[in-house]
Image: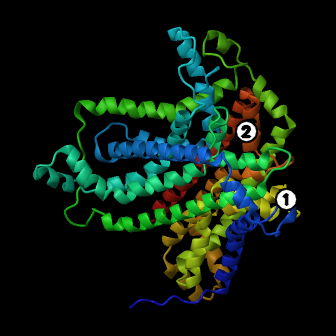
Amino acid sequence: MAVAPRPASNATLVLIVVVGLLTVAPVAMLAFGSFSAGLDRFGEFTLAKYAAAYTDPGLPRVALDTAVFVVGSTLFSALLALVLAYLNTRTDIPFKLLFNVLAIVPMMIPHLLFSVSWALLLNPSNGLINLALMRALGLEQAPFDIYSMGGMILVEGLLNMPIAYLVLAPAMASFDVSLEESSRVFGAGAWRTLLCVTLPVLRPAILAALVLGVVRTLASYAVPRVLGTPGRVEVLATWLYEMIATGFDPDYGQAAALGMSALALSVVLIAVYRRLTAESERFVTVSGRGWRASTIALGRWRWPLFAAVALLCLVVIVLPVSALLYTSFVPYSMVPSADAFAQMSWRHWIDAFADPISRLALRNSLFLAVVGATLGVALSLFIAYATVRSRSRGAGLLEALTFLSFSFPGIVIGIGFLWLFVQTPIYATLSALLIGYVATYLPYGVRPLASAFVQIHPHLEESSRVAGAGALTTMRRIVLPLLVPGVVSAWILMATMFLRELTLSVVLSRPGSEVLATRILSFADDGLWGKLSALGIVVIAISTGLVLLAAAVGARFRTSGLAAG
């Protein structure tokens, strides 16, 4: 007999109001702003902004470039992830630890720095790889130009590949190989089996990876800004930013009108993604009887394919970080040589941290990471508890509101927050960034904490209440100690996201509230590659340290749990 949902408790209603203000308010302000004559005439109704936005003669070109960029990057990342997932879960390829590295380590490198590193390697004027090839082959012109649509698709695809892999690998691992064997017994060849059996069974996971890739690429700003702008390739994110950041009279209303379409598309795509992942259970092929994991022998292709995966590791991880580290020490872009190593110095590092704006940006970013992650995790703790433990109607609404922000393109929702804050005292302050960060990245705190709550049996809390403890005492003495690994993971994940955040920052940051990402971007715009690289290495070092700390804390608590057991 189904249990009827209970009415929402007062605590859940309070959480709904708070989360609603964080997620729905900027969307509502974006909508109102799109119908307003301007920031100083908010509420003065007009349709002129929509007319101007959708009749702009440059819109078709931007829409086409955006579509090519989104589709190309998504297909490239999904295809690469599908091949890697198959090799890792279904074959005897050696050193499978590399796949874990490929799935996790790239997330420590901010998208901005990854884009800049490839500009350092393949820009047509003095890219390190281009210079080396020109010198080695006697070429007069650089063979590669990263400032192009092809370069943007390559870099964005490499950035999205780990996310697609994390979606596809579990589905591939649970695939029952006996289905393929049955197909071959009935005379189907390898390609027909792949097309008629394997891919249809994996269809929900593949479609989910594609939809998620489209959402992430549509919201991408770092790659189009660093690689597209110099090559005069403009996509929706950079076009919206140009509307509000250039000229003597930026048109925030027109940007809001165009942003509404991007926001609506992203929300629909995320709804499709969640539907696909929810329905994937119908395609599960692992059962309690008869299922077996089978490993396909690669034979003579075993080591060549391993070499290809190792090369991918080099391209995705080693080359970008090495390019930044090397550039931070040499006086200018030069091919690595004995002469280059002889000229290495700490000059760029000293100049970067002697710059007062860089020091301010570092302090602001650390403040936002520490304080923002703490506030975000505290709010996420109550949200996760309410959504996991409560069977009320309000819990479902709360969960929907929380994960709504996951579909927000950064530039678009940044414009919404700008409309929300512009006539308030917190406009152009760190508080505006703090609220925007917490609202946008709230799902990153709720997800690990909800998973942790699921693993704690409700009987523990019920026993505490039977013994006379109140709700807060039970939370403090029973639940929180068991949640420490999840709390640490959520805090470090949010702090890492806040430390590297770019898209909201470029819209909301103003003089005095600069952060590391905006300072690094300004160095890139000015061509100050050495300073940029030094500051970028600091960001990567802090992010890596936080991730290693999370791993150490998790391992310690797992060990303690085993010892206690």
Q: Secondary structure at mark 2?
A: helix
Say left or right for 241 vs 446.
right
User: Could you tell me if residue 287 is visible in this image?
Assistant: yes
**Residue 32: numbered disc:** none
**Of 249 and 292, the residue lying toward us:** 249
Considering the image in quadrants, where does the C terminus appear?
bottom left
**Which badge, 1 or 2, is on the more N-terminal residue?**
1
**Of 358 and 143, the residue lying toward us:** 143
Task: Please state which amino acid type lies under the numbered disc 1.
Answer: Tyr
Q: Position of residue 91 (x, y in %)?
A: 28, 43
Q: Position of residue 149 (x, y in %)?
A: 55, 36
**Residue 521: numbered disc:** 2
User: Could you say which quadrant of the image residue 440 lies in?
Assistant: bottom right
Say left or right for 43 vs 240.
right
The residue depicted at 62 percent of the width and 10 percent of the height is 338
Say left or right for 18 vs 104.
right
User: Could you say which quadrant of the image residue 124 lies in?
Assistant: top right
How crowded pointer 1 is (Cα within 10 Å; few <14, some 14-19, many 20+) is rated as some
- Real-space Cα separation, disc 1 to disc 2, in angstroms: 22 Å
Task: Please state which amino acid type lies under the numbered disc 2.
Answer: Leu
**Of 283 and 93, the residue lying toward us:** 283
The residue depicted at 42 percent of the width and 32 percent of the height is 310
Q: Position of residue 130 (x, y in %)?
A: 57, 19
Q: Secondary structure at mark 1?
A: loop
The residue depicted at 74 percent of the width and 34 percent of the height is 525
The residue that label 1 is drawn on is 427
The answer to whether the residue labelled 1 contacts the one labelled 2, judged by CB atoms less than 8 Å apart, is: no
**Of 450 and 553, the residue lying toward us:** 450
The residue depicted at 81 percent of the width and 38 percent of the height is 358
21 versus 491 height, above or below = below
